[in-house]
Image (cartoon, rainbow, N blue to C red):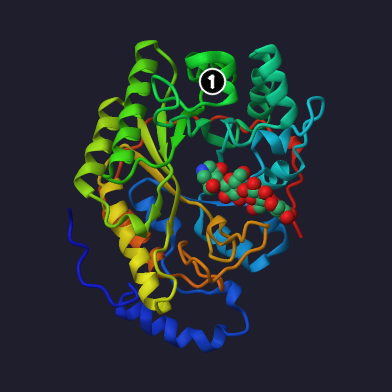
Amino acid sequence: MRNRGAKSLVGLTRREALLAAVAAPAMAGNLGAWPIGPDLRAAARVSNRFFGAAVQADQLRHDAPFREAVMGQCDCLTPELELKWAAVQPVAARFDFARMDALAGFARHHGKRLHGHTLLWHRSIPGWARAAIAETRDWAIIHRFFAAVIARYDGIVDYWDVVNEPIEIGDSPTHLRRSPFLDAFGLDYVRRALDSARALSPKGRLLINEYGIEYADLASESRRGALLALIDRLRQQGVPLDGIGIQAHLDLQKGQLDQAVFARFLQDLADRNLLVLITELDVREADPRLPWAERDEQVAGAVRAFLDVALDQAAVRGVTTWGFSDRYSWLNDDGRGVMQPGRNRGLPFDAALRPKPFVQAIATALRRVPYIVPPPVEIVPLQVDSMFDTTPPP
Ligand code: G3I
């Protein structure tokens, strides 16, 4: 793979390092608006891709510096929680779109797109639906949820994670995960989900989003094989599947990425005429006792090795990180909903919103790849205009 060339310890160019040093004292009282660091939106534009991050509506509402930084760097926002089934339909008779509407209104006001995460996920089924599905095996329960969500947000969502994390080796003969969906509807539920989504969203890009498919270990190898087999089965049946989301929760404990193996997998997807998104990029660290600079360089190294390969592949259309700053990361959640921002430094910006070498790694990878010729675009009018308050959250 390409050699990225020499870098300073923290991955900044000399000029950026100098600018950062000059700016640091001036910014000391206002870390929220840190002015230095690559512009990820601009970098993504160079190759006609996009950069995005998963965020929560409450974070944007209550944290102005965070909001400003996210808006400055992202083209697309993924709702970390707000669109999940348990969040939008906590009881059968009531949809609660308040938080998702806040995020959508906010995105729209700032000219951002949304990533539709997620429709079917075994970990976000409301209790009532779990019971109802098991009892009635009635697909209409799922279709109604799809219909409500897609009708409301399709105009601002380009990509839908229609099925999230369907693979679990050994759970079933075809390695589809054992879930309430599999139990009630059998191996055919993925097809039904994609068909339902297509009926409701003729133009949306429909994805299967999966994790654990990046490394070369046996488990990942099996998961890749099972996913490709699922794709082939769906394709043979003419099922509307447009692409694959690769979550990319990288893990330093897993050692170095085997770039050739990962490149082969991406090519396997491209050969099937699928588009690919990197949907949940972040890095779990191996040794939090090391000095910060060293940790950040290790994290950036893993990102560089990954994106080098990912962005060599023209089928890859965009990169989204799972969170934006270490201030809010599922890897820093203590399990009781309390953030411990120093625990893991696996996101592009640190807890003070300063760009880390991770940012430089994304920007460099995005800028140095060939421009992707865009497919002809039909402008789809936003269907949700009147529904959102367009004033930014206070
Ligand atoms: O906010 C409440 C808090 O008030 C309460 O005290 C605490 C008690 O557990 O819960 C807090 O809510 C938690 C929420 O995260 C806060 O961020 C939920 O319990 C917890 O289930 C939720 O976890 C989210 C998880 O998906 C399940 O929805 C994570 O934030 C989110 O990062 C994670 O995202 C998933 C993707 O959707 C799919 N891929 C993997 C990725 C990481 O697990």
> How many badges with numbers are in the image?
1
The one nearer the camera, 251 or 272, is 251
Vertical side of 4 occupied by 243: above or below: above
Quarter of the image where one finds residue 292: bottom left
* Amino acid of disc 1: Leu
Vertical side of 263 occupied by 32: above or below: below
The one nearer the camera, 193 or 78, is 193
Residue bearing mark 1: 182
The local crowd at label 1, few if under 14, some if 14 to 19, many if 20 or more residues have their Cα within 10 Å, is: some
Vertical side of 200 occupied by 254: above or below: below
Residue 45, position in %: x, y?
Answer: 39, 51
Q: Residue at x 57, y 19 (%)?
A: 183
Q: Residue at x 70, y 12 (%)?
A: 136
Classify mark 1: helix, strand or loop: helix
Q: Would residue 297 be found to the left or right of residue 114 on screen? A: left
Q: Quadrant of the C terminus?
A: bottom right
Q: Is residue 173 visible?
A: yes
Q: Is residue 108 visible?
A: no
Residue 87, position in %: x, y?
Answer: 71, 39
Q: Would residue 257 be found to the left or right of residue 382 on screen? A: left
Q: Would residue 321 be found to the left or right of residue 340 on screen? A: left
Q: Would residue 355 be found to the left or right of residue 67 on screen? A: left
Residue 55, position in %: x, y?
Answer: 60, 52
Quarter of the image where one finds residue 221: top left
